Amino acid sequence: MTLDNGSTQVSAAAAIAAAPADAWLLDVRERDEWAQGHVPTAHLIPMSELEGRVAEVPLEDVIHVICHSGSRSDSVARWLRAGGRDAVNVEGGMMAWMSAGGVVVVDGADSASA
C-alpha cells in the first residue's frame, strides 16, 4: 500500500506470515533494543550504522524493515527505496509484531509474544 507521503507499509501480521519463508527482515534498532527481544530471522543493522553497511542489504529481495514502533523503520525503508531496493516498513514495529503474536528471541530463547 503506497501512502500519499511515499511510504510503503506492511502490517505486522503480513510480515509475520512472510518472515520464516522468504522475507528479508532488517531490524534497525540499536543493539540494546535488539538484546531485549528480536525476531529470530531478523538481521540487525542499526539505523546509525546503515549507511556504512548498506552493502549487506540484498538488492534482489523485498526488505521488511522493523524498529520499535515503526518510525525509524519507515525512514529507513524510504531511504532504501531511494537507493533502488524494494523495501517496506513493518507498520507498528516490534510493538505490533508482538501484539500480533509474532515470536521473539530474548537471550537466545524463543518466546511467544503477548
Image (spheres, helix red, strand yellow):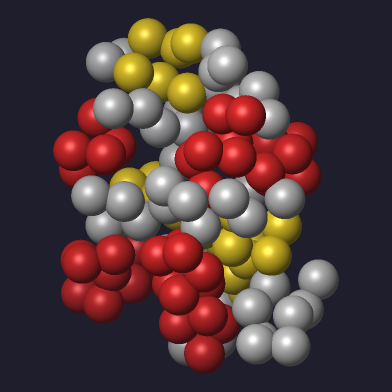
Q: How many marks?
A: 0
Depth order, front residue of 10/44: 10
**Is 30 displayed left or right of 64 in the figure?**
left
Residue 71 at least partly seen: yes
Q: Position of residue 56 (x, y in %)?
A: 35, 63
Depth order, front residue of 20/77: 77
**Is 56 displayed left or right of 110 in the figure?**
left
Q: Which residue lies at the image location 31% right of the left edge and 51% below the top edge? A: 29
Q: Position of residue 63 (x, y in %)?
A: 57, 61
Above or below — where is 77 with respect to 16?
below
Quadrant of the rendered structure where residue 22 is? top right
Q: Position of residue 43 (x, y in %)?
A: 39, 46
- The N terminus appears in which quarter of the rendering? bottom right
Above or below — where is 72 with respect to 31?
below
Quadrant of the rendered structure where residue 113 is? top right
Q: Which residue lies at the image location 21% right of the left edge and 67% below the top edge? A: 48
Depth order, front residue of 69/19: 69
Quadrant of the rendered structure where residue 91 is? bottom right
Residue 24 at least partly seen: no
**Is 27 displayed left or right of 63 in the figure?**
left
Q: Position of residue 102 (x, y in %)?
A: 61, 26
- The C terminus appears in which quarter of the rendering? top right
Q: Which residue lies at the image location 68% right of the left edge and 36% below the top edge? A: 16
Q: Which residue lies at the image location 47% right of the left edge and 51% below the top edge? A: 69
